[in-house]
Amino acid sequence: MWSANVSRADQLTISSISATSLAQEFGTPAFIMDEVDFYDRAKSWDQALGTAFGSHAGNVYYAAKAFICVEVARWIKEIGIGIDVCTGGELAVALAGGIDPSKIEVHGNNKSVAEIEKAVSAGVGTIVIDSLFEIDRVAAAAQKFGVVQDVLLRLTPGIEAHTHESIATAHEDVKFGFSIASGSAWQAIEATRTHASIALRGFHAHIGSQILDTDSFEISAERLIALLAKYRDTFKEELPELDLGGGYGIAYLPGDEELLPTVVMNALAQAVKENCAKYKLAHPRISIEPGRAIVGPTMFTLYEVGTIKDVTLENGNNRRYISIDGGMSENIRPALYSAEYTAVLANRTSNAPMLSTRLVGKHCETGDIVIREISLASDIAPGDLLATPATGAYGRSMASNYNHMPRPPVIAVKDGKARVILRRETEADLLRLDI
């Protein structure tokens, strides 16, 4: 739930820097990021992939959608893993961070011609094709730049992953990919083979996000390998790659479990091995795409309490509302997905009785609720600091300027030193686009 270098004694600290010091130097709200923990988590997924699959290990592609900035892209380059991007903007950040284009995978269900041409001209390693239109677009771009572009086909294996509907992506009624069951996947396979400027390397599937068991991943691997076998039997050649996506769940609340790299990779390795043997296929090269599992626990959000209000409910019970200086503009997930978080008093300890509390933001929306129900100390007062853990994934990356709120900074902490890697927006930034 918290990153490795966070501790809680007299107050919350990260790498020996107190929450109070961070708030005084960088203001609130702010995303506080454990740089060492990010490195360790990325390396653990890379090592687990390599150990489980050996010579058949492909790339760990960090999913940029979870959170990316130029400095994090530099870390990814230094760690030596790849990156998965899904827009021209994410591609621009990855390139600005110096990531080798051959380690960039380009995703997205509606890539524009300009985005595709930018990717091909940059020399990206793989483009994941999501529609029949994209087959022609990628082929035309590759021909324009005189290259043969490696591609994967994104497939929907027809799995109801156990996660929120909005982040489940592999059942039939979704906007992503080609359906194996309906036959559109085979139609896409045949279409790619008509173009000399693209090279189909294999298949890709991403079944959803925040998944906390391995069963769905194993079923997905089985269905992709069955299609590899059909391809082999039809065209008398084997495709060499599978990308099994990401979506590995993390712990958000006390008592939550997370999917550990070794557990996931060992289960996947066994499933791939058994199904390749079943269909008498050569073992494909396996890649994965963890995003949340790497960056999610490395960050927490630091807030300052602004106002406190006690409300009497219809049943006669009381609820305390604590308003913080952020809200849905930097954490939209509770409103979008009913995502649950916890929070702690960060600038001091308290022995006061606990009260049923609702933690809310400062936006002009009744639904601007960060935590719907939590027990917090009854003596929390304006000016106190609260910290919400595990906000590294889809916090800053989904942040908005709703109510013209400047987006918070990201502060990287390492070896007792803190530095800004993504600065706080200002009101001047908000006005700059006005004509």
Image: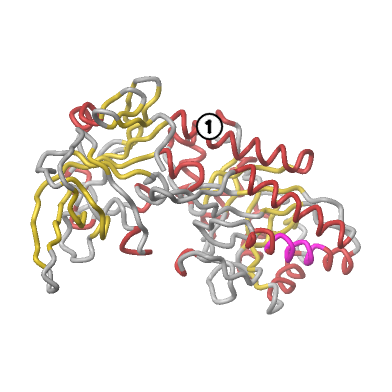
The residue nearer to you, when weighing 179 against 106, is: 179
Was residue 225 drawn as part of the magenta stretch in this picture?
yes
Which residue is found at the position 47% from the left and 43% from the top?
92
Query: What residue is pinned by disc 1?
Result: 40
Task: Please identify the dominant SS of the magenta region.
Answer: helix
Identify the residue at the far bottom of this view.
182
Which residue is found at the position 24% from the left and 30% from the top?
11
Indicate the amino acid at tag 1. Asp
Q: Specify start and end residues of the magenta stretch as a single range.
A: 220-228
Count numbered badges in the picture: 1
Horizontal side, residue 108 vs residue 368: left or right: right
Q: Residue 426's spot in the image, x, y percent?
A: 20, 41
> Looking at the figure, which quarter contains the C terminus?
bottom left
Q: Is residue 225 above or below residue 75?
A: below
Q: Is residue 151 above or below residue 302?
A: below
Was residue 349 drawn as part of the magenta stretch in this picture?
no
Asked if residue 149 shows in the view, the reply is no
Quarter of the figure with residue 160: bottom right
Q: Residue 431's spot in the image, x, y percent?
A: 18, 49
Horizontal side, residue 91 vs residue 178: left or right: left
The residue nearer to you, when weighing 23 against 137, is: 23
Q: Residues within 10 Å of mark 1 (few under 14, many from 20)?
A: some
Q: Is residue 104 above or below residue 271?
A: above
